[in-house]
């Protein structure tokens, strides 16, 4: 008898758990993005440049002076991005004045919840 079908063959703590239909959202550049992620201590985003090189950034929610910015995981340098905060009234992560470089896969720090965010130029 064959083993049951596993839709997530690489679902462990080192890989992202991808659902059958991956949630996505599109945001116009220069406008705020209301990303529907639950409250968490840290948030991650993985973005890919034109050479298919991946960059992982981490954001820590405010707890003193060590918060409020995106940081590159490999070299611990800050990354320019729109002002980011978690809005407790909306229950969403808000990135104001989103840029092209803010597009990517956003997820909670433990990588349980994720959403793909695309940026658009707009209609002009």
Image (cartoon, grey):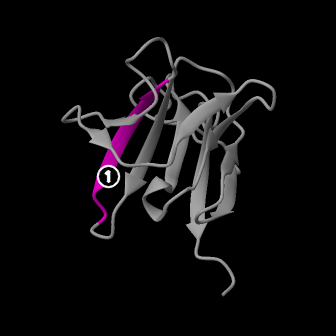
Does any portion of residue 40 appear in the rendered image? Answer: yes
Q: Quadrant of residue 13?
A: top left
Q: Is residue 23 magenta?
A: no
> In the image, 76: left or right of 30?
left
> In the image, 103: left or right of 20?
left
Does any portion of residue 1 appear in the rendered image? Answer: no
Residue, x 59% and y 20% (percent of image)?
Answer: 40
Residue, x 59% and y 63% (percent of image)?
Answer: 30
Quick check: 94 above or below 111? below
Label 1 packing within 10 angstroms: few (<14), some (14-19), many (20+):
few
Q: Quadrant of residue 25?
A: bottom right
Quick check: 72 above or below 41? below
Q: Which residue is mark 1?
A: 54
Disc 1 is placed on an element classified as strand
Image coordinates for residue 65, horizontal then vertical, percent: 39, 17
Quick check: 54 above or below 72? below
Q: Residue furthest top?
A: 64
> In the image, 82: left or right of 80?
right
Q: Which residues are magenta?
A: 52-60
Quarter holding the N terminus is: top right
Image coordinates for residue 37, horizontal then vertical, percent: 67, 33
């Amino acid at each position: 008898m064959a083993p049951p079908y596993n839709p997530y063959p690489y679902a462990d703590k080192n890989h992202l758990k991808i659902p059958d239909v991956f949630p996505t959202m599109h945001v116009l550049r220069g406008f705020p993005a209301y990303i529907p992620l639950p409250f968490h201590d840290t948030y991650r985003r993985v973005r890919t440049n034109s050479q298919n090189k991946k960059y992982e950034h981490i954001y820590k929610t405010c707890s003193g002076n060590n918060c409020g910015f995106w940081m590159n995981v490999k070299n611990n340098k800050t990354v320019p991005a729109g002002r980011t905060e978690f809005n407790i009234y909306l229950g969403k992560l808000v990135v104001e004045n989103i840029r092209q470089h803010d597009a990517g896969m956003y997820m909670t720090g433990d990588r349980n919840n994720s959403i793909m965010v695309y940026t658009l130029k707009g209609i002009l």
